[in-house]
């Protein structure tokens, strides 16, 4: 942060002769590495192998939904770029299962309710305790 403001004039400028040289600066020491091969503890830049996340799945009681949730375990054995396909497949299945809950049973002749604004609730009773004459 600078203390310079336009009212104070020009900002101070440091000149090379104003800077003192650092005291006894030596380069950092290089670690001793074996010359006959790679070090076993060297970090690997290769992607890690797929591993299960260990997330538990609680059964819902609906076979269709439970099967879809079990399908999520397939992602545990795939590399990260393969997870999207599994997640999208499960999402489609769950969306279909939810949509089927809104479907009318076969043989129901009643027309389906048209989507629209919600119906108003019961009308409040008319208050006739006041004299409404003007």
Image (spheres, rainbow, N blue to C red):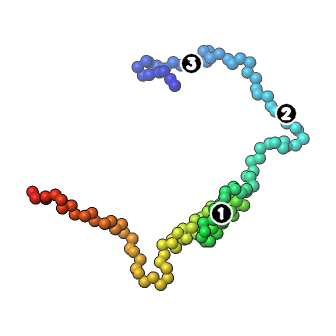
The residue at 73%/52% (across/down) is 47
Which of label 3 and label 1 is nearer to you?
Answer: 1
Can residue 85 be seen from the camera position used here? no
The residue at 79%/28% (across/down) is 29
Query: Which residue in the structure is indicated by mark 3?
Result: 14
The residue at 54%/68% (across/down) is 95
Please, what secondary structure does the residue beneath circle 2 have? loop
Q: Examine the image and state in which quarter residue 59 appears.
A: bottom right
Crowd band around label 3 with a 10 angstrom C-alpha radius: few (<14), some (14–19), many (20+)? few
Q: Examine the image and state in which quarter residue 79 appears.
A: bottom right
- Which image quarter holds the C terminus? bottom left
Closer to the chain start, of discs 3 and 2, is 3
Closer to the chain start, of discs 3 and 1, is 3
Query: Which residue in the structure is indicated by mark 1?
Result: 72
Please, what secondary structure does the residue beneath circle 3 have? loop
Which of label 3 and label 2 is nearer to you?
Answer: 2
- Label 3 close to label 2 by CB (< 8 Å): no
Q: Examine the image and state in which quarter residue 129 appears.
A: bottom left
């Amino acid at each position: 942060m600078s203390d310079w403001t336009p009212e104070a004039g020009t900002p101070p400028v440091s000149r090379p002769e104003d800077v003192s040289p650092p005291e006894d600066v030596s380069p950092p020491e290089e670690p001793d590495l074996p010359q006959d091969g790679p070090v076993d503890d060297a970090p690997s830049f290769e992607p890690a192998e797929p591993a299960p996340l260990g997330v538990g799945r609680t059964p819902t009681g609906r076979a269709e939904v439970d099967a879809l949730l079990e399908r999520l375990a397939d992602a545990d054995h795939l590399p990260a770029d393969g997870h999207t396909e599994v997640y999208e497949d499960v999402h489609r299945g769950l969306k279909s299962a939810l949509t089927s809950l809104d479907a009318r049973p076969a043989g129901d002749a009643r027309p389906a309710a048209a989507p629209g604004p919600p119906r108003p609730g019961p009308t409040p009773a008319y208050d006739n305790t006041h004299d409404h004459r003007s």
